[in-house]
Image (cartoon, rainbow, N blue to C red):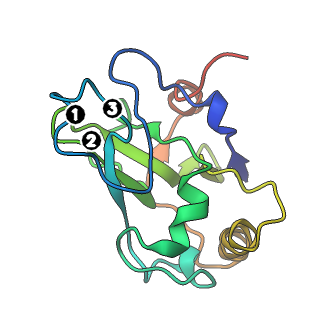
């Protein structure tokens, strides 16, 4: 299953709100009163099969601009220790939370990809990223190793 989480549904409020941006933070968020952006880019494994049809480096690069500017990072601190997102957002040094834009997991007997990036428009970058995720999920290589319970996933989002 692919869960496309609208950015406005992702829990991300309070004084330490994650303010995602394509550029890295300006100097120091503690001194700038958390002026946006409050993140330092993304990390991913370009050899991961989810990116087989989406060209990427292991870090933020221009192919990510459109995706990142239409996304909300999920705060994954309450997930099990060692849980790694497929696309990790690097938080600032002051708050150092575990953040993700995309992650996969086994949930009960099912398999799930959760994506906090808007992929519901006709932009070629969003279409290609979505195509790459869907092809990966339809393949034999989609075998998440991390287990989560539904409540842990539900806790990442605001109640509707």
- Residue occupying the point 66% across, 16% down: 159
Q: Are the residues flagged by discs 1 and 3 in contact, CB closer than 8 Å? A: yes
Q: Is residue 35 left or right of residue 101?
A: left
Q: Earlier in the sequence, mark 3 or mark 2?
A: 3
Where residue 79 appears, as percent x and y from the top left, is 38, 36
Q: Is residue 25 left or right of residue 139?
A: left
Where residue 130 appears, as percent x and y from the top left, is 71, 67
3D distance between C-alphas at marks 3 and 2: 29 Å
- Residue occupying the point 47% across, 47% down: 147
Residue tagged 3: 35
Q: Nearer the viewer, residue 31 or 102?
A: 31
Q: Is residue 160 left or right of residue 92?
A: right
Q: Earlier in the sequence, mark 2 or mark 1?
A: 1
Residue tagged 1: 29
- In the picture shown, does residue 144 fall above or below 54? above
- In the picture shown, does residue 60 fall above or below 18? below
3D distance between C-alphas at marks 2 and 1: 26 Å
Instruction: Give the crowd class for mark 2: few <14, some 14-19, many >=20 residues within 10 Å.
Output: few
- Residue occupying the point 70% across, 47% down: 3
* Label at residue 81: 2
- In the picture shown, does residue 15 fall above or below 126? above
Where residue 93 appears, as percent x and y from the top left, is 16, 41
Q: Secondary structure at mark 3?
A: loop
Q: Are the residues flagged by discs 3 and 2 in contact, CB closer than 8 Å? A: no
- In the picture shown, does residue 132 fall above or below 105? below
């Amino acid at each position: 299953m692919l869960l496309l989480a609208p950015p406005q549904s992702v829990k991300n409020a309070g004084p330490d709100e994650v303010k995602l941006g394509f550029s890295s933070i300006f100097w120091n968020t503690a001194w700038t009163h958390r002026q946006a952006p409050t993140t330092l880019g993304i990390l991913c494994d370009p050899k991961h099969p989810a990116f087989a049809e989406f060209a990427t480096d292991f870090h933020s690069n221009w192919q990510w601009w459109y995706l990142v500017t239409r996304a909300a990072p999920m705060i994954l601190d309450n997930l099990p220790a060692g849980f790694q997102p497929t696309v990790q957002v690097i938080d600032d040094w002051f708050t150092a939370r575990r953040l993700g834009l995309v992650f996969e997991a086994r949930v009960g007997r099912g398999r799930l990809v959760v994506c906090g990036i808007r992929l519901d428009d006709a932009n070629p970058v969003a279409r290609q990223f979505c195509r790459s995720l869907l092809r990966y999920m339809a393949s034999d290589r989609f075998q998440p190793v991390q287990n989560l319970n539904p409540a842990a996933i539900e806790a990442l989002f605001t109640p509707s």
